[in-house]
Image: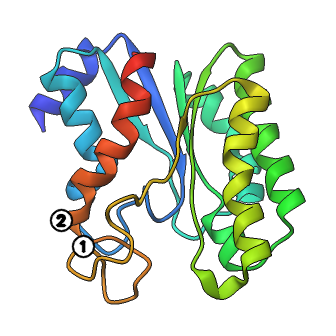
């Protein structure tokens, strides 16, 4: 696509999205995902950023932490959007381990003077109130501790809406992606 090449050449800075299937556009066209919509919005509004989607479906906080140094070296981002933890929670992994991994991701970015936007996630109630509440609280706790911006819940206004969710009840349809972009945009725009 010649337009995309020109847009990338004109970009002065980059944003790396480090996420899981919710950012990897699982089950829909890549171009319909919120990350692609973000890149289009940045271009339309004159922000000179290119967006690199380093999201992998099924990724956990430990998997993302392991591949982070290579991604930072390869793309040299100015901002990293961290959308992780959902797979940890759905697998019932240790919350202290997940929190430690997210903290390490933030710390590695900060050591390189890269700004971080943390995106929160919630779990379905069938994991029990104690686990789901602790999981949900992990994100604001990290945001406070590291003084990083937080988009409280990526799927706000999308989760639970059958018209916006794929039949699996976990992944949003293309129709839900613009709402997800808005949930991120409110926290990201002041960083631009």
Q: Position of residue 102 (x, y in %)?
A: 75, 45
Which residue is drawn at the image coordinates 44% and 62% (left, top)? 22
Picture layout, residue 82 above or below residue 26: above
Q: Residue at x 36, y 32 (%)?
A: 186
Q: Which residue is mark 1?
A: 164
| Label 1 to label 2: alpha-carbon separation | 6 Å
Query: Up-down: is 11 above or below 174?
Result: above
On the image, numbered disc 2 is attached to which residue? 175
Q: Where is residue 119 drawn, in percent x and y?
A: 54, 45
Q: Do the residues bearing badges 1 and 2 touch, measured as CB atoms within 8 Å?
A: yes
Counting from the top left corner in percent of width and height, residue 86 is at 61, 66
Q: Quadrant of the C terminus?
A: top left
Q: Secondary structure at mark 1?
A: loop
Please tell me which residue lies in front, 65 or 186. 186
Which of the 4 image quarters holds residue 136? bottom right
Q: Is residue 32 found left or right of 181 in the rendered image?
A: left
Residue at image point 24% right, 26% down: 42
Tell me: 97 left or right of 130.
Answer: right
Q: Residue at x 13, y 25 (%)?
A: 44
Q: Nearer the viewer, residue 156 or 90?
A: 156
Q: Quadrant of the N terminus?
A: top left
In the foreground, 43 or 180: 180
């Amino acid at each position: 696509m010649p337009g995309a090449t020109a847009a990338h050449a004109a970009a002065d800075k980059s944003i790396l999205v480090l996420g899981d299937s919710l950012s990897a556009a699982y089950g829909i066209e890549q171009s319909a995902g919120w990350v692609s919509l973000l890149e289009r919005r940045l271009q339309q509004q004159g922000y000179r950023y290119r967006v690199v989607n380093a999201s992998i479906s099924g990724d956990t906080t430990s998997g993302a932490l392991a591949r982070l140094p290579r991604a930072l070296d390869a793309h040299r981002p100015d901002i990293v959007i961290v959308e992780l933890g959902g797979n940890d929670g759905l697998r019932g992994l240790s919350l202290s381990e997940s929190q430690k991994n997210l903290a390490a991701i933030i710390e590695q970015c900060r050591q390189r003077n890269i700004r971080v936007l943390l995106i929160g996630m919630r779990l379905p109630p069938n994991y029990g109130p104690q686990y789901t509440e602790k999981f949900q609280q992990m994100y604001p706790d990290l945001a406070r501790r590291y003084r990083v911006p937080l988009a409280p819940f990526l799927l706000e206004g999308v989760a639970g809406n059958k018209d916006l969710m794929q039949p699996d009840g976990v992944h949003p349809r293309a129709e839900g992606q613009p709402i997800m972009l808005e949930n991120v945009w409110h926290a990201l725009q002041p960083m631009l």
